[in-house]
Amino acid sequence: MDPEPNGFPNFFGTSAAAPHAAGAAALLLECNSALTPDGVYNLLESTAIDMFTPGYDLDTGYGLVNAVAAANIACTSTGNAQDLIGTYWPEAGQFYLDIDGNNSWTPGVDIIANYGASGDLPVAGDWNGDGDDEIGVYRPGTGQFFLDVDESNGWTPGVDAVARFGAANDLPTAGDWNGDGDDNIGVYRSGTRQFFLDSDESDSWTPGVDTIANYGTLGLMPVAGKW
């Protein structure tokens, strides 16, 4: 079978996939020894080439391992030990990020990233498990997250993630809800004082698995962290 098509028949199954996945994992760890097992898994999953049914499916899982794409992210990880500040200009859809960590704007060093559309709300988190945070936006009118999975600081069709989570006019948040080392999306519904957290990392609401937390009073805004 050659569903891509790329001229090479596919050989499916654990015996076919395991050596390739193991080799790709070793390559990622050679580039970035700080990666956790979950981080390696998430990098391989988020950069895989989708096959057959869009998204995860029982025939091909998350798709064909793309070792080059995963390694490009792992090998360019900055490995910052601390979080750095930044701002978001909602009318222009631009992030301004303090890359050098001096708490002021440094022309030619700090980054301006065009991401999102006018009216979007900013969010940041480690979407791919490489140890660095990446940018993203939440579109409150449609309840959609747009996440910069490949760390290009721009939208990459077919690679960056679109996740529908929450309802119109929810407020975005992100954090490591399940303790696996990477961040997951969530929303806060100020009218009902409820957090809705994507605990299973499916990028969609899973009844009975994802978390609902009643917290705060009417009109407050969300914040998350390791307190």
Image (tube, rainbow, N blue to C red):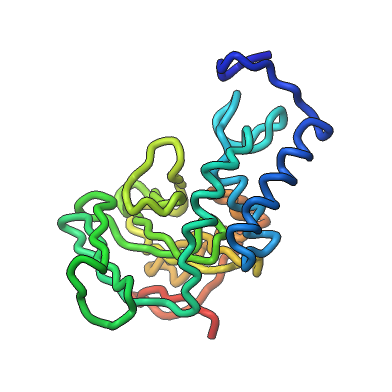
Residue for point 56% across, 19% down: 4
Q: Could you say which is closer to the camera, residue 35 or residue 52?
A: 35
Instruction: Work out which quarter of the rendered image holds the N terminus and state it.
Output: top right
Residue at the right extreme, as displayed: 15
Residue 187, position in %: x, y? Answer: 44, 62
The residue drawn where x is 45% and y is 54% is: 166
Q: Taking 58 as reference, is 199 left or right?
A: left
Find residue 2 and report its horizontal and vertical position in percent.
Answer: 63, 15
| Residue pictured at 71% horizontal, 42% vertical | 21
Q: Residue 19 or 148: which is nearer the viewer?
A: 19
Residue 209 % position (x, y)? 67, 57
Please say if 220 is above or below 176. Answer: below
The answer to which quarter of the image holds residue 54 is top right
In the picture, measured across the screen, residue 214 lies left or right of residue 59, that is left
Residue under the point 23% across and 61% down = 112
Task: Name the spot of residue 28 as percent of width and height, x first.
Answer: 62, 54
